[in-house]
Image (cartoon, grey):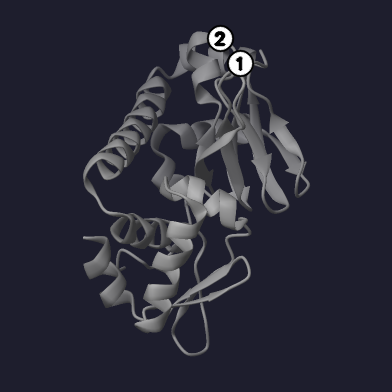
Amino acid sequence: MTPLDPGPTTPDDLGAVAALLPLMTEVVVERGATLFAQGDRHETMYLVREGALKVTRANRDERPTILAVVGPGEMLGEMALLDGRERGATVTAITRAHLLELERDVFDRELERDPAIAVALLQDLARRLRRSNDTVSDLAFADVPSRVARTVRHLASKFGTTTDEGHLRVEHQLTQEELAQLVGSARETVNKALASLSRRGVIEVRQRTITVIDRDALERLAG
């Protein structure tokens, strides 16, 4: 599997958290609906089975900024299970999404039986922290074209589907402004970088869809 090849998530990928799957209930979130909002006190965790959701955060007197896009196999809200504090961000469905929900009281009972579950959650939080550190490093040191290439690569690894021609189509469903927020730059600058990649034959850009034509070139540009 190459870095750009999407693959299904299996219980083995989830480690000890897989033991929680029989205890979780299915939740369907329609496109545009909010799963939970910043400041909520709901102590529940979610595992994404299908679909895509965006994570946004708003500071006082500022518009929300998109922090991440999550997809199948990723967890949301696990911090509420560990500290019981209010939600630090808002999660909204970009597409119709199928999730599994776990209540904190169920988690607490299972944790007493199998403490390794906490380790698995901490490992997931550690991976998320590493991604956050990478994002901060990108904003500080990487130029916009490199950040755009890395964002496309990241989205392709999560949501890409292989076309008949062997390309990787990513129907990200983000607006131009949201995509720019994810990159961490102005919309006009990000659009210029996408256009440059398109002219070079690396990607093909259509409304809310990016198709990776040359995976090797995208890898080189992402660095």
Q: Residue furthest front?
A: 188
Q: Secondary structure at mark 1?
A: helix
Give the label on residue 158, or none. none
Decide: few, some or many residues near mark 2? Use Cα within 10 Å; few <14, some 14-19, many ≥20. some
Quarter assignment of residue 133: top left
Query: From what the image shows, is residue 217 above or below residue 158?
Result: below
Q: Mark 2 highlights which residue?
A: 84
- Does residue 122 show up? yes
Tell me which residue sits at (42%, 62%) in the image. 152
x%, y% of residue 183? 42, 50
User: For the N terminus, which image quadrant?
Assistant: bottom left
Q: Mark 1 highlights which residue?
A: 104
Q: Nearer the viewer, mark 1 or mark 2?
A: 2
Tell me which residue sits at (27%, 61%) in the image. 222
**Tag 1 and tag 2, C-beta contact below 8 Å:** yes
Decide: few, some or many residues near mark 1? Use Cα within 10 Å; few <14, some 14-19, many ≥20. some
Tell me which residue sits at (42%, 78%) in the image. 198
Tell me which residue sits at (73%, 52%) in the image. 96
102 or 144: nearer the viewer: 144
x%, y% of residue 51? 63, 53
Label 1 amino acid? Arg
109 or 3: nearer the viewer: 3
Between discs 1 and 2, the one toward the N terminus: 2
Quarter assignment of residue 148: bottom left
Query: From what the image shows, is residue 130 above or below residue 204?
Result: above
